[in-house]
Image: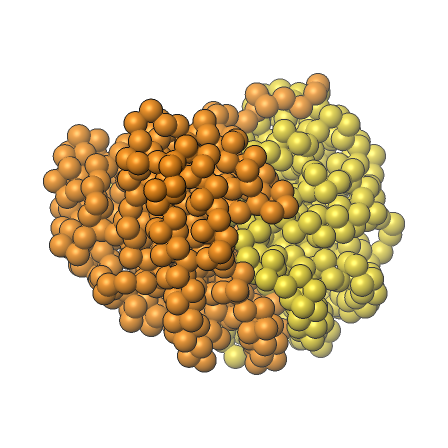
Chain colours: A orange, B yellow
Amino acid sequence: MEFTDSIIARRMKDINGSAIREIFHLLAKPGMISFAGGNPADTALETDVAARLAVKALEKYGTSLIQYGATEGFAPLKESAAQYFRDTAGVPATPDTLLPVQGSSQAFDLILKALIDPGDVVLVESPTFLGALQAIRTYGARIESIPTDEGGVIVDALEEQIKRYHPKMIYVIPTFQNPTGVTLAADRRRPLAQLAAKYGVLLCEDDPYRDLRYEGEPLPSIASYDAEGWVAYMGSFSKIIAPGLRVGAVIANKTLMRKLVIGKQSADVHSPMLNQAIVDGYIREDILMPHIRRILDDYRRQMNAMLDGFKYFPEGTVHTLPQGGLFVWAKLPRGMDALELFPAAVEKNVAYVPGTHFYPDLGHTDTLRLNFSKSTVEEIGRGMKILGEVLGGNGR
Amino acid sequence: MEFTDSIIARRMKDINGSAIREIFHLLAKPGMISFAGGNPADTALETDVAARLAVKALEKYGTSLIQYGATEGFAPLKESAAQYFRDTAGVPATPDTLLPVQGSSQAFDLILKALIDPGDVVLVESPTFLGALQAIRTYGARIESIPTDEGGVIVDALEEQIKRYHPKMIYVIPTFQNPTGVTLAADRRRPLAQLAAKYGVLLCEDDPYRDLRYEGEPLPSIASYDAEGWVAYMGSFSKIIAPGLRVGAVIANKTLMRKLVIGKQSADVHSPMLNQAIVDGYIREDILMPHIRRILDDYRRQMNAMLDGFKYFPEGTVHTLPQGGLFVWAKLPRGMDALELFPAAVEKNVAYVPGTHFYPDLGHTDTLRLNFSKSTVEEIGRGMKILGEVLGGNGR
């Protein structure tokens, strides 16, 4: 018989792939100004440093670097990364509680694999990272929303949702959230850790943007307030070194860690040591912090250019004012539809992501996500002006 | 409350990790002769070539090599690997039907993710690769065995099992099987592809050892006989270039491929391009085939030394006579127990894997798997002699 998709798993039948990654296929058009991605600037990626660190590591560690390695990760990186997340985020990480993974996407996939039985509930901010929504769905979990405001997750509302849905997990991006750019208020961080412990729910703190702060003071991670192991911290080097290396880390209590390691054994045996060694080199040679400082200056200018560009948008447009990260979020005036206007924008060579894709229940077609890291200040100005025209703004 | 494993998913509760990877922790003991792993020889791993190809690729492709990349894989490798598997295995691969993955372990994990609803049946050879057994269990599938003989899977018996269990998948390692070293007979290959199509079952052909042939002529892959998309072919560069790079590939029909790509989007977004580019360099510079020829000469000597070493084993021991791969499989005389004797062997500084771990239902404690690729000819002779003594052989 011909191959038929009737053998596809029920939970996978209706999952048709990331809308963003589909939009990427449109961006090959020459001259396109893309506010659609979440990529670091190419100028923030140092191929010369990567090459030097790769050669140095292969010389230093020899064949062990390309032989089978431990599922638990490359020992030097486990140590340096644990130190890094202790220093920058206050996460109580040790080499034993830190697992290097293929970006924080794999961290989340392994946590879902460890915890989710079909039908379990996962609470998420709404809107949230659409890759996380897709991952949750591939495990057959139910998704319910957490009410948020300009300070991120609303603590009392979260408690109500926990009581109502008895979730197994809470997924939160507390710092410069994707897609909104909003940061969870300082005084809500300890209460979130406490709620997770009180109700026995695992809180997944996805924190890949933490180090991209252009204004204000860093806040402690939610995990820094976790005394009983109910917060799993997902860190990433994608946004501060290079996404293509695929190196992130998950920090979790030892009971959960054991199941994450077992899940990783069958997912991919281990992460490539060469890539882990390059990231370890960045940390140990003390070149990571100066590198971050340099890219912050560029990204700050780009973000400010984007915020300035809203002057071209129609009156009544509302947008976030992030202190860092890669994204600004906008809500168009009543009656306007960012999903409907998307083809017209692409036609004029400017792309964004319609906000509807980030909502568990879709809708909210008046919203859009704009990324500033992949465009120059000049492109941002030009692109925002074009978008303003497409949206019928008056260029006030 | 304290963190409790009561929130772990039901299907993960009883999975406690790969027995082999636990055995690995014992092998750090100095002077240990390990027949336990499945690692290539360190002398087969070329760190200088890896370093040169990494530098060359970073120069050639620039920041695109460490920026976010396509889930579908690094385009040059999709092309070169498709050509490679067409040439070496007769698999009808094209860049569109080939997905680079983190070793064939990830290929299998993504196929399981795409197909398995809890309770679905997967048929496997018994014994089989224990990583596959663990992966199947993490998806909550039921495992049933396929009868085999010295020619691998018995075709009629497989058809009986298909009729009885209505499986969704069949998992087979047809060439130099792990753990037995047995190769599926030439005249059984087309019938297996036909059975998969007749009953609408996906046959996963895991073929990482194909190129490690020390005797006899290569056989066509099962996938080469697949006309309707019911065979998914899993290839790997782990055994012929370097496992630590974590580069393999899965070749599947386009309907299934779409779901594998979606699964990979949420599993790890994409595989690192640097690693894919190193493997692509090996293929395109025509250094892979000469490299394989060189390692074959070494491995052939090592295998023969191991086969010779069975003279130290007790009378009545039966073992396979592989034509390639990394493993020899042995069955001890009646009443002997390879699981029970394992601590005594480790005490004498020789390790193997008790065969019981490779059986879906355990048992078969009279069997063991011996790997020869990671030890020198001298170590193999010495190790087999020690093992013979531990087993009470008479050194005939």
Dividing the picture into quadrants, the one containing residue A287 is bottom left
Q: Is residue A22 left or right of residue B55?
A: left
Residue B380, compared with residue A17, is above or below; it is below
Residue at figure coordinates x 43%, y 64% from the top left: A298
Dividing the picture into quadrants, the one containing residue A258 is bottom left
Residue at figure coordinates x 55%, y 38% from the top left: A348
Farthest residue, direction right? B217
Q: In this view, does B166 lie to the left or right of A302?
A: right
The location of residue A257, given as percent across then percent down, is: 35, 55
Q: Which of B142 and A386 is in front in this view?
A: A386
Residue A65, compared with residue A375, is above or below; it is below
Residue at figure coordinates x 48%, y 69% from the top left: A279
Q: Which of B11 and A224 is in front in this view?
A: A224
Q: Is residue B255 left or right of residue A213?
A: right
Picture quarter with the C terminus of chain B: bottom right
Asked whether the viewer can see residue A363, the reply is: yes
The location of residue A366, given as percent across then percent down, is: 35, 31
The location of residue B341, given as percent across then percent down, is: 52, 62
Q: Number of marks in the image?
A: 0
Residue at figure coordinates x 57%, y 51% from the top left: B69
Q: Is residue A191 left or right of residue A363?
A: left
Residue A218, compared with residue A185, is above or below; it is below
